[in-house]
Image (cartoon, grey):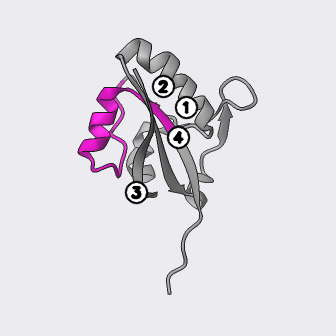
Amino acid sequence: MTTRQATTTLWRPTGPAELDLVRDLDWRAWPPRLPEQPIFYPVLSEDYAIRIARDWNVKHDGAGFVTRFEVESEFLGRYPVRQAGGRTILELWVPAEELHEFNAHIVGAIQVVHEFR
C-alpha cells in the first residue's frame, strides 16, 4: 500500500502564450523561464491570482487565466513564502534554474480554473 504524499494547492496567473506552453507539456509542467525571468512565482491565494490575471494579464496579453495545481508539501518547504504586498499577497519564489525539479514535484495536472478577456 502506498502512502499518499501531502500536497499544497498553488495558483498561477498566466497569459495565453505561457498557457499554450503548459498545454504543450500535457498540463504536467511549467515551461522554462525566459532570460529576463529569473524567478517562477506561483501564488498561495486564488483571489490574488484572479486579480493578476484579470487586471494585468488581460491588459498586457488580451487574456488572463488562473491555473491551479498541487505540489508535494514537503518539497515546497525549501521555498520561503514571500509577502508581495498586503497580508494576503503571498508568493513562492522558485529560481528559474530549479523549475525542472519543481515540476517533478507537481502532483496531477495543471488546471485552468478562471479565464478573463
Extent of the magenta region: 11-35
Q: Earlier in the sequence, mark 4 or mark 3?
A: 4
What whole-number distance in Å separates the C-alpha atoms at marks 2 and 3?
Answer: 25 Å
Can you tell which of label 1 and label 3 is closer to the viewer? 1
Where disc 4 sits, the SS reads strand
Cβ atoms at labels 1 and 3 below 8 Å apart:
no
What whole-number distance in Å separates the C-alpha atoms at marks 1 and 2?
Answer: 6 Å
Where disc 2 sits, the SS reads helix
Q: Quadrant of residue 46?
A: top right
Q: Which residue is mark 4?
A: 11
48, 96: nearer the viewer: 48
Cβ atoms at labels 1 and 2 below 8 Å apart:
yes
Q: Residues within 10 Å of mark 1 (few under 14, many from 20)?
A: many
Of the numbered discs in the image, which one, if any, rests on residue 53? Answer: 2
Q: Residue at x 23, y 43 (%)?
A: 24
Can you tell which of label 4 and label 3 is closer to the viewer? 4
Q: Earlier in the sequence, mark 2 or mark 3?
A: 2
What whole-number distance in Å separates the C-alpha atoms at marks 1 and 3?
Answer: 22 Å
**Amino acid under label 4?**
Trp
99, 50: nearer the viewer: 50
Q: Which residue is mark 1?
A: 49
What whole-number distance in Å separates the C-alpha atoms at marks 4 and 3?
Answer: 17 Å
Q: Which residue is mark 3?
A: 104
